[in-house]
Image (tube, rainbow, N blue to C red):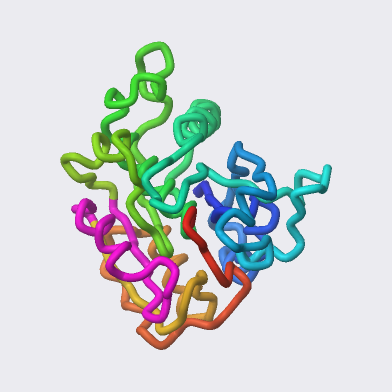
Amino acid sequence: MVVMFLHRYGQNANIFSKRVAALRKSLDNDIELVFVDAPHVLQPVDLTGHGTTPDAFGAPEASTTSKDPALQPQGWWTTDLTRTRTDGLEDSLTHLRDILRTQRFEGVFGFSQGAAMAALLAALLERPHLHPPFLVDGEPPHPPLKFCIAVSGFKVAGPLSAAVFSEGYTTPTLHVLGKNDILVVEERSRVLINVSTGKRVEEHEGGHFVPSKATWRTFLKAYMLNPTGNIPSPGPYSASQPGSGAVTPLAG
């Protein structure tokens, strides 16, 4: 089984892989994780324009001046104070399309902005004709996914997202909320949850991070292997505070 992992705004594939190291190691050889870099390398204004720094995005090692791709902060799109702009979103979908056309994935796992992107990708793969540039010679680049996991997710703004989610989407999706997440608050996540007809919602007692205690690692692995199964809840008090990210400003 192969699962695509999408990082948050201000991180990259390498940094996200480190932040979820406990989960990654717990999956052993049963599930292959493919961490994907967003195509947009962020500039200082993209990080500091809203009073934030790389450290605030859970990526203190990231540097906008580094030539090392493993240290460059990246994003799936950039936005403004209104959160209504999604500059670069279509380029990111093209980027993912080109990966999907060459490799098969059972599911997608995203955190924060990556979770928003993961849900949009899952929905688009159900109705790819809604965004013709996503097609390859008129055909979908990949079959619909078997599952999506969205941790601290939200619904992408803009007309493209509105069209893709207009009838909801059916891909089994696990929505993980942080009860004390003050950055992607429950109300914001519920907008995405409401268009997810194959939803399962679990909540941890922490903030804006991927829960990493053993009960959650076991649960997440079980969900990936059987997303429609009757898997016991990990419980609302099972989260620990790893470094998946301390803050998600406007872009998520």
Q: Position of residue 164 (x, y in %)?
A: 27, 36
Left or right of 203? Residue 165 is left
Q: Is residue 11 left or right of residue 119?
A: right
Image: 207 above or below 174? below
Closest to the observer, 52 or 24: 52
Q: Is residue 194 magenta?
A: yes
Residue 110 visible to the viewer? no
Closer to the camera in the image, 145 or 76: 76
Work out which residue is located at the far left of the displayed protein and give it.
Answer: 167
Question: Is residue 75 placed above or below 98 in the rendered structure?
Answer: below
Q: Position of residue 16 (x, y in %)?
A: 63, 58
Question: Residue 90: image x %, image y %?
Answer: 45, 30
- Residue drawn at x 26%, y 69% is 230
Residue occupying the far right of the picture: 67
Q: Is residue 101 magenta?
A: no
- The residue located at (74%, 57%) in the rendering is 62
Q: Residue 246 is drawn in which quadrant?
A: bottom right
* The one of 218 and 246 positioned closer to us in this rendering: 246
Report the magenta residues as a range. Answer: 172-198
Q: Residue at x 43, y 46 (%)?
A: 117
Check the image and report above or below for 23 versus 143. below
Dividing the picture into quadrants, the one containing residue 48 is bottom right
Q: Residue furthest top?
A: 137
Q: How many marks?
A: 0
Check the image and name the residue furthest to the bottom.
237
Q: Is residue 220 left or right of residue 144?
A: right
- Observer able to see residue 241: yes
